[in-house]
Image (spheres, helix red, strand yellow):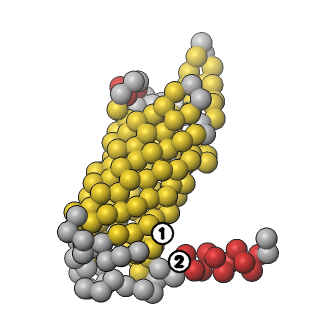
Amino acid sequence: MSKKFVILCIICICHYASTAQIELAKIIGKNSEKYGLGYSAFIKFSYPITDGDDISLEFGATVFMEKGSSTRGLLYAPLKLGYRYTLNRTGRGFYIEPQLGYNVIGAYTTYDQGTNIDKKINGFVGSVTAGYLFQPLGNINFDIGLRFETVKFEGGSANAVSLKLAHYFNFGRKRDE
């Protein structure tokens, strides 16, 4: 595949809408007491298919550190495809967004008998977000949401609940208001 084709594809994707977002997350379920709050940063590209629906592609990273340690924790970086459905069908207001993907980069470091043990985490990622898309304030668009995410990998899974805040950057096509 030529470099020109790849660059053209990236420009076409960025031509529509891109989102930079941050999240605060908490692992739930098995071994959740071992971890403090996690932090995430994502970049999300969305393509409107109707006034109330978008298809999205998202890549980001989430980090959870073990309590009392600065060297042990959990890191995963999934690539996900999603479908955002606004309940009032306007592209604003309350929405639901399921996403499926694959954890392309991941590591889990634990402590066993005096030694740090590193394990790779690659596998299926599924999430669902319920949130609210605010009306634009000038050129500023905000989105707030609550996400449940599960990361499956050999030997287990990690489940997390997170609160996200996103600011949308528009690169061209805008929704009709």
Q: Helix or strand or loop: what does disc 1 sit on?
A: strand
The reply, left or right, for residue 138 in relation to residue 84 is left
Image coords of residue 28 (percent x, y): 34, 32
Eyeballing the image, is 8 above or below 157?
A: below
Q: Image quadrant of residue 9?
A: bottom right
Identify the residue at the far right of this view.
Answer: 2
Q: CA distance from mark 1 to mark 2?
A: 7 Å
The reply, left or right, for residue 95 in relation to residue 48 is left
66 vs 27, nearest the viewer? 27
| Residue 164 in view, yes or no | no
Amino acid type of disc 2? Cys
| Residue 54 in view, yes or no | yes
**Disc 2: which residue:** 14
Q: Which residue lies at the image location 50% right of the left edge and 55% below the top edge? A: 80
Picture mark count:
2
Specify the quadrant that holds the C terminus.
bottom left
Q: Which residue lies at the image location 23% right of the left edge and 81% below the top edge? A: 137
**Disc 1: which residue:** 45
Image coords of residue 99 (percent x, y): 43, 53
Q: Which residue lies at the image location 60% right of the left edge and 12% below the top edge? A: 113
Identify the residue at the far top of this view.
Answer: 113
Image coords of residue 146 (percent x, y): 28, 51
Image coords of residue 77 (percent x, y): 54, 49
The 10 Å Cα crowd at callout 1, few under 14, some 14 to 19, many 20 or more, is many
Asked if the residue at tag 2 contacts the one at tag 1, i.e. Cβ–Cβ closer than 8 Å, the answer is: yes
Q: Helix or strand or loop: what does disc 2 sit on?
A: helix
Q: Which residue lies at the image location 37% right of the left edge and 85% below the top edge? A: 174
